[in-house]
Structures are given as C-alpha cells and as structure tokens.
Image (spheres, helix red, strand yellow):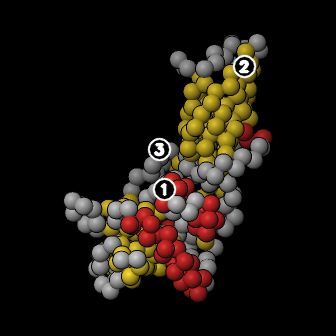
Amino acid sequence: MRSEFEHEERRSEMKNWCIIALGLGCNGCMLLPGDGDTVGSSAEPVTFTGFTLAGEQRVVVEAWTPGEVIEVGFNQVVVEPWPPGEVIEVGFDDSDREPLHYDGLELHPWSLTAPIPGEAWRALRRDASFAKVRARVIGGGSDGADADAISFVPNWGACLSAHPDVNGFLANCRSSSAPFAFVYTRGFPPGADFAILRIRYGDRLEVGVWNGGRSGIVTRIDCSTFGAHVSAPFSEVLEPGELKDLTVGIVPRPGLTLACKVTGTDLDGTPEADTADNVRSRVF
C-alpha cells in the first residue's frame, strides 16, 4: 500500500475530480481504493476514503463473498454464479460535520482503514487474490433510501488530462464496475486472462470462457471444424473469476474435431495476451 503521505496527497488531488461527480447530483464518491488498486496481501489494512454532500452521514464499506467455488479443468478455480452472494461489512465512518469548501460546494470527507475480511478474498492462482467492495451512504438517496457511492478508475490524473470536460470525465473516468471496486493483491495478472474451459453442445454450441485475471471484455470467439468456420463477435464483460457460456452459431460434426479460440481486451482496450489457454478443442 501507499504511505500515509501518499494517501493524503492523492486524496487532496482527487477531491477536485470527485467534486465534478458530486456537483452533478451524485450522493457520494469513494476515491480510494480505485477500481483496480493493488495491496501487498489480503491481510493488509486497506484505506477507504471519499466525500458526501451532507455532514454526519454514515458510510458503510461492504465486501462480497465470492459465491460458489467449483473446479473445472486442471485445478482451475472459478466462481459461479456471479455476482456473489453474501455481503460482509468491512467497517463504517461518519462523514465530517465541518465541510471542505470548493467553488460553492460543501464536501464532507469520510475515511476508514481496515482489512477486508478473509472470506471476501478469492484466490484464482497461487499467492494472488481479489476482493469486490463498495461504499454505501446510509440515507443518502433523494428519497431517504441508502445510496451507493461512485467508484472510479485508479489512474485519475491521466484520465482527467485526456477527458477534461465534465461529460467526458464521467463517461471515461468512472469505473465500469461502479459502484463497485475490485482490489487485487500483488502478483495478480495486470490485465484480463481469458481461457476456454469447456465446449458443450445441446441445442446450441456453448463455449465456456473463464477470466483468470482482472476485468476484461470478450470481443470474439472463432470456432472451426472440417468445412466450416464461424467468427462470432461479442462485447461481453467478464469480471475476475467469472465463467460464462457464450453461444456460437456453428454445429459440430460427429467424430470430427471442433477448435475454438477466444479473443478479448482489458477494460481500457488493451489486447489480452494470447496464450495456449485461449484455445480449446473437442471431438464430438
């Protein structure tokens, strides 16, 4: 994790960006952790911090258990179903009574530091885990209901420089997982890591794609058999540990091999690394 000085420096820096979202009617923001931030280990305390528009509002930080864990293939652990089930409270804080003033707005900071409970972490590979968290503002909605705080991407500076206008900032700098944020331990893959774990055929062909890395997008599945080839486009987001069966319009032929390959990108459009796990064959 960053030092306390770095946390305070980043918190002050990101306050201006959070104001943009709050000024457009949002109820709160979670600046840290950014969606995709990394910690040293699952036992390490994590700093959660953000702002609300009213003082003395309770903000509850929550994490999710990963749901049912199953084994597919060669000891590859996947999470199914997704989203996961039980909510675990990480901790809470009441936003400050005294606000920070900026351009006529009153912003009330909140912050807490606590470890994410062990049952909320899921290891997809040796010594590398992830957890899914969010911050909830109690009574922060316009109707008095609870409201989720917005989460954002971790690389604030670069994103703001590329998209300085309000609409561009919200469209490109808000986390695609908002209001959630994924936190990873050191050693977790830097991007998406897709693998085809199964190919099934009933009334249609289903290709089971698993993501063993960070959130990413499946963009295409190519399947070939003797005398036939199909390239099926997708725009399917897979979160860490998620397994989805995607339909491809090709009919396998009895006794012949069908080979499929998955192609995808990270959330920012960076192509996912092409490895042997991207391809799988089956004889029907």
* Residue 139 is at least partly visible in this image: yes
* x 63%, y 52%: residue: 268
Q: Quarter of the image containing the C terminus?
A: top right
Of tags 1 and 3, which is closer to the observer? Answer: 1
Q: Position of residue 52 (x, y in %)?
A: 36, 72
Distance between the alpha carbons at the discs numbered 2 and 1: 42 Å
Vertical position of residue 281 compared to residue 69: above or below = above
Mark positioned earlier in the residue sequence (3 or 2): 3
- Amino acid type of the residue tagged 3 in the rendering: Pro
Q: Tell me the residue that label 1 is attached to.
A: 167
The disc label shown at residue 229, or none: 2
Question: Left or right: where does residue 222 sit relative to residue 173?
Answer: right
Q: Residue extending furthest left?
A: 143
- Frontmost residue, 71 versus 202: 202
Instruction: List the residue tagged with mark 3.
Output: 81
What residue do we see at 28% from left, 66% from top? 140
Q: Gap between marks 1 and 3, in whole Å?
A: 34 Å
**Residue depicted at 58% across the width and 38% down the height:** 235
SS state under label 2: strand
Image quarter of the N terminus: bottom right
The answer to which of marks 1 and 3 sits earlier in the sequence is 3
